Amino acid sequence: MDHRAALHAILRRAHSGELTAALAYRGHWLSLRREDEIAEIRRIEAEEWHHRRRLRVMVLELGSGPDLYLESRMALLGLVILIGCNMVGWFIPMYFAGRLESQNDREYEEAAAHAEALGLGELHGELKAFAQLERDHEAYFLRKVAGHPALPFWKRWFHWGPP
């Protein structure tokens, strides 16, 4: 397996994905009314922007830059979500934010494994920390949607939610 190519591909996708996530979280907190939820989602948004900045450095250190085509697609998706959060109520943004975070966790774990195989200890540690932060985000959203009457329907279709 070409660990360097795999790591590079994951980091480029993650860099673009963090753009979508940060824009989506901006729309998410703008759609909320409770100050505690607004503050938490704003904090998560800031962490996504931080991940994006660090991922850019990682991609550059591996010898290339972001995938501009993917960047533009993910920016558009993020803007659509940003606008859509104001149209779909409280539950759907909370649910899909948690589901997305669960996928990000796995992506960072995979990247960390490639970094470890390449002997990039510092990068491995940072990517493991990113994965843990994504798990923390997911746990927040799991707590938010737990017990919501719409949860069984969405969980059945999208296979994510609290036990």
Image (spheres, helix red, strand yellow):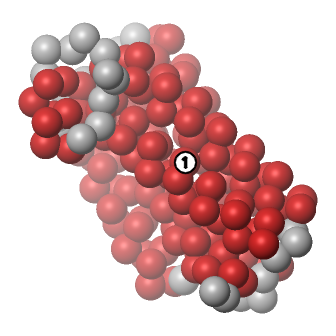
- Residue under the image location 29 percent in, 37 percent down: 160
Q: Which residue is mark 1?
A: 105
Along the line of sight, the residue nearer the viewer: 92 or 36: 92
Residue 45 in percent (x, y) is at 55, 39
- 35 with respect to 158 (left or right): right
- 110 with respect to 98 (left or right): right
- Residue under the image location 14 percent in, 36 percent down: 156
Residue 146 sits in quarter: top left
- Residue under the image location 50 percent in, 11 percent down: 36
Residue 154 sits in quarter: top left
Residue 144 sits in quarter: top left
Residue 95 in percent (x, y) is at 30, 32
Q: Callout 1: few (<14), some (14-19), or many (20+) C-alpha neighbours within 10 Å? A: many
Q: Is residue 87 visible?
A: yes
Amino acid of disc 1: Asp
Where 73 falls versus 139 (above or below)?
A: below
